[in-house]
Amino acid sequence: MNEHGNMNATEIQIDDLQFVRYITAENIDRKINEIARKLRDDLSDKYPMFLVVMNGAFIFAADLMRKLDFPCELNFVRIKSYQGTQSTGNVDIFMPPDIQLRDRYIVIVEDIIDTGLTITSFRKYLQNLHPADIRLTSILIKPEAHLHPVHTDYPGFSIPDLFVVGYGLDYNGKGRNLPDLYQLKA
């Protein structure tokens, strides 16, 4: 990941960009425990369907699911709206065709809420499938970047509008495997 190969460095370089450690794996784990408690309180008797937005949310989803001690279902969806460090403004949704969502309690699991375009588009898509309820959890939220009103039911960390990598988030396909979150160096 950097010139020394140390994935726990306080500063790293990925391709042409420099990043500094921003949120540690330990702090991420504490936040996920908090989110899991709230989900348990709200949905443990609802047999919710977790829809994990790939690729970025897979690590968050895996850590979250291991902390849930109630029956639930999990599926993966792919929503593409980014290229490099910028949103393209277009949203493409790819979901397995056999998922039945009518009258189900849905929890969208996201890695990051930036402009809100992706999640707003996905919610509209899901509403047409007539679920009982749609809720959202995201490990990262960038309120300053919101161009669409987005309510995150189970929020992780609120962060400034700077690019981040690690913990499932990437820069040109690199950095997803970092256990900590790194922010673009100013």
Image: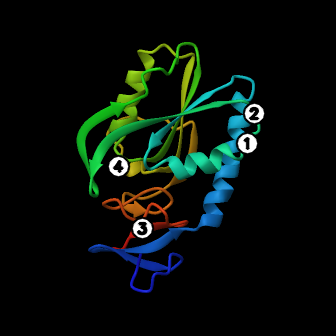
On the image, numbered disc 3 is attached to which residue?
183
Which of 36/52 is in front? 52
Using a 10 Å C-alpha cutoff, classify the residue at mark 2 as few (fewer than 14 neighbours), some (14 to 19) or many (20 or more).
some
Image quarter for residue 28?
Answer: bottom right
The dot on residue 145 is 4
Kind of residue sitting beneath label 2: Phe
Counting from the top left corner in percent of width and height, residue 19 is at 39, 73
In this view, 70 is above or below 162: above
Q: Secondary structure at mark 3?
A: strand
Q: Secondary structure at mark 2?
A: loop
Q: Secondary structure at mark 4?
A: helix
Q: CA distance from mark 1 to mark 3?
A: 28 Å
Q: Viewer-nearest of labels 2 and 1?
A: 2
In this view, 180 is above or below 13: above
Mark 2 and mark 3 in contact? Answer it, CB < 8 Å: no
Residue found 56% across the figure and 21% down from its top: 133
Image quarter for residue 176?
Answer: bottom left
On the image, numbered disc 1 is attached to which residue?
37
Kind of residue sitting beneath label 1: Arg
Q: CA distance from mark 1 to mark 4?
A: 28 Å
In this view, 182 is above or below 130: below
Kind of residue sitting beneath label 4: Ala
Using a 10 Å C-alpha cutoff, classify the residue at mark 1 as few (fewer than 14 neighbours), some (14 to 19) or many (20 or more).
some
Q: Viewer-nearest of labels 1 and 4?
A: 1
Counting from the top left corner in percent of width and height, residue 136 is at 53, 35
Q: Earlier in the sequence, mark 2 or mark 1?
A: 1
Q: Earlier in the sequence, mark 4 or mark 3?
A: 4
Kind of residue sitting beneath label 3: Gln
Counting from the top left corner in percent of width and height, residue 36 is at 69, 43
On the image, numbered disc 2 is attached to which residue?
70
Residue found 67% across the figure and 30% down from its top: 72
Q: CA distance from mark 4 to mark 3?
A: 15 Å
